[in-house]
Image (tube, grey):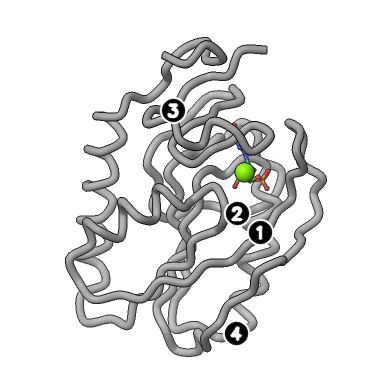
Amino acid sequence: MHSCIEKILITENQISTKVKELADIITKEYTNKDLLLIGILNGSYIFLSDLSRHISIDHNIEFMKVSSYGDGKNSSGNLDISLDLQSNIENRDVIIVEDIIDSGNTLYKLNNYLLQKKPASLKICTLLNKPSRRLADIKADIVGFEVDDHFIVGYGLDYAQKYRNLPYIGILKD
Ligand code: IMP
Ligand code: MG
């Protein structure tokens, strides 16, 4: 275990089992649909790549870079789009792929932004959900794990851009 980790919350095995389950749900629900996954950088890059490889229907991938977090542990609440979509999502079946929903401020604003582009459907898939921290009125449709109010890192999640490479999800030491 990394020396900055207090405790492993979700093991590599638990993550991989869950990601396959989520991919199966998506495969079943989106058969014969024009599926587009939008990965939210940077946090979702590992989750998206594992999820995509287990979805067995054809689909497209796009990335957006949006944030409401700086380098610290608190949300600024403002949505900043630094990488926008490269394709038209009108009439397509879109799933936003997130690493974690915390306050929900990022997703709330992103969801409204994408709805204006008139997708056929728009859902949210998140690996992790921290419902106790929710401020915005937003709910994920496909959720991997519900977690308590800890600051966690690994499997794409960072603290000050570090620890994304850890294969498990752990609670960061203070
Ligand atoms: P929200 O707008 O407060 O929901 O923040 C969402 C974003 O904050 C996520 O996509 C993460 O990048 C980041 N974030 C929230 N909680 C954590 C955490 O516990 N560890 C690492 N990043 C987090
Ligand atoms: Mg982040």
Q: Nearer the viewer, mark 3 or mark 4?
A: 3
Decide if ligand 1 comes within 8 Å of the CB at mark 1.
Answer: yes
Mark 3 / mark 1, whichever is N-terminal: 1
Tell me: residue 160, above or below residue 111.
Answer: above
CA distance separating discs 1 and 4: 15 Å
Q: How many marks?
A: 4
Q: Which residue is mark 3?
A: 169
What amino acid is at disc 1? Tyr
Q: Position of residue 24 (x, y in %)?
A: 20, 56
Identify which residue, 143 or 85, lies in the foreground.
85
Q: Nearer the viewer, mark 4 or mark 2?
A: 4
Identify which residue, 109 or 83, lies in the foreground.
83
Q: Which residue is mark 4?
A: 117
Q: Which residue is mark 2?
A: 138
- Label of residue 28 in the image: none
Q: Residues within 10 Å of mark 4 (few under 14, many from 20)?
A: few
State the SS at label 2.
loop
Decide if ligand 1 comes within 8 Å of the CB at mark 4.
Answer: no
State the SS at label 1.
helix
Q: Which residue sits at x=59%, y=36%?
A: 158
Mark 3 / mark 4, whichever is N-terminal: 4
Mark 1 / mark 2, whichever is N-terminal: 1
Q: Position of residue 104 (x, y in %)?
A: 65, 48
